Image (cartoon, helix red, strand yellow):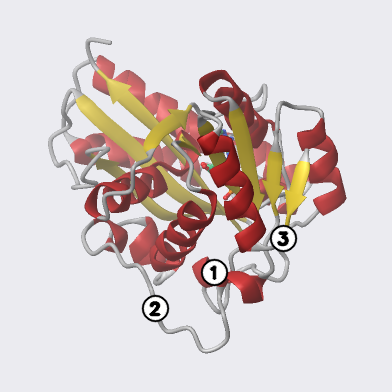
Amino acid sequence: MQRFRRPARMLEWSRQQRCAGDVIAFVPTMGALHQGHLSLVDLAAERADRVVVSIFVNPAQFGPSEDFDLYPRDLEGDLKLLSEREVDAVLIPDTGDLYPAGFTTWVVEEELSDKLEGAARPGHFRGVTTVVTKLLLVVEPDIMILGQKDAQQVAVLKRIIHDLMFPVDVIVGPIIREPDSIALSSRNAYLSGEERKQAVCLHDSLRLARKLLLEGEVDSGVVMDAMRERIESEPSTRVDYIAAVHPDTFETLDTLSDTTLFCLAVFVGDTRLIDNELVELGN
Ligand code: AMP
C-alpha cells in the first residue's frame, strides 16, 4: 500500500495506473475509520483494479463553532485497517497543499446546498464540494464511492460531477449500522453510555416513518409528528431537523411519494447525529 502526502505524487501514480489500463476507484474519508468506511473500500475493490482512499479532516467543511479540533483522528489505526484491505494507495494531504496560502477559489453548488444540512451548517457543502473537486483533480479516479449515510452529500456531489462534467461514476454504498441499528459514525465516539442507548431513537423514528408510509399514510405532517414524538421521548435529545424529501432534489414533500427520503439531524447531548431512510415503494 503506497502512501502519498504530496498531491503531485498522487497524480503521477494515478496516471501511471490508468496508462496501464487500470480502473481506479476512490473513497474520500476524514479518517477515524470504521466498518462503514471499510464497506466502501470493499465496494471499491469489487468495482475497480486499483483502490485509492484519502484521509483528510477538511477544515473548510466545519463551521467556526463546530468540532474540527475535537474530531477523532487515528492515522496509525486507519493505516493498519486499510493495509488489511485491498487498498493500493492512501492520500494523506497536508492542509497547506490542498489550500495554498491566500487561496480564494471555492466550488459552490447553489440549489441543493442550502437545504437541510446546508441550512443547519452554513458553508458546510461549500467546503465539501471544494475539497472533493480538489481530490478528484488529484486522484483522477474512474469511480468515486460514497456512503448513503450522508445522503445530501451524495446528491450535492452527484450534482457537481454532472455540472462540472467530471468523468467519474458515483457508486453509493448502503448505511452500515451497529447491531442495535445506530448508524456507524466517527462522531458516535463522543456519546456517553447513556446517550448511546438513547441514540437508537433516530433509527426507530425512521423505521416508524417507513412503516407509516407502507401502511398508506402520505401526509408528511402526520409522519413527521410521529417521528418527533419518538425522538423526544428520550430525555437527552433535541431535534435539529426532520424532513421527508425527494432524494435527488431534496425538495420537501408535503405529500409523501413512492420515492421518499426521510432524513434527520438530532442532538443527543452535545453530539449532533444524522441518519436517513430511503423508502421506494414497489421495490
Ligand atoms: P467521513 O469520514 O465521515 O467523511 O465519511 C467518508 C465516507 O464514508 C462518506 O461517503 C460517508 O457517507 C461514508 N460513511 C460514513 N458512515 C457510514 C456508514 N455508517 N455506512 C456507510 N458509509 C458511511
**Front-most of 156 and 47?**
47
Crowd band around label 1 with a 10 angstrom C-alpha radius: few (<14), some (14–19), many (20+): some
Give the vertical position of 250 relative to 56 (above or below): above
Q: Secondary structure at mark 2?
A: loop
Q: Is residue 270 visible?
A: no
Amino acid type of disc 3?
Answer: Arg
Is the N terminus in the top left, top right, bottom left or bottom right quadrant?
top right
Labels 2 and 1: the sequence-earlier one = 1
Is the C terminus in the top left, top right, bottom left or bottom right quadrant?
top left
- Residue wearing tag 2: 105
Instruction: State the separation of the CA atoms marked 2 and 3.
Output: 22 Å
Labels 2 and 3: the sequence-earlier one = 3
The quarter holding residue 196 reads: top right
Labels 1 and 3: the sequence-earlier one = 3
Q: Secondary structure at mark 3?
A: loop
Question: Residue 211, how many percent across, how many down?
Answer: 34, 19
Instruction: State the separation of the CA atoms marked 1 and 3.
Output: 22 Å
Give the vertical position of 132 relative to 126 (above or below): above
Give the vertical position of 91 relative to 66 (above or below): above
Amino acid type of disc 2?
Answer: Thr
- Residue wearing tag 1: 62
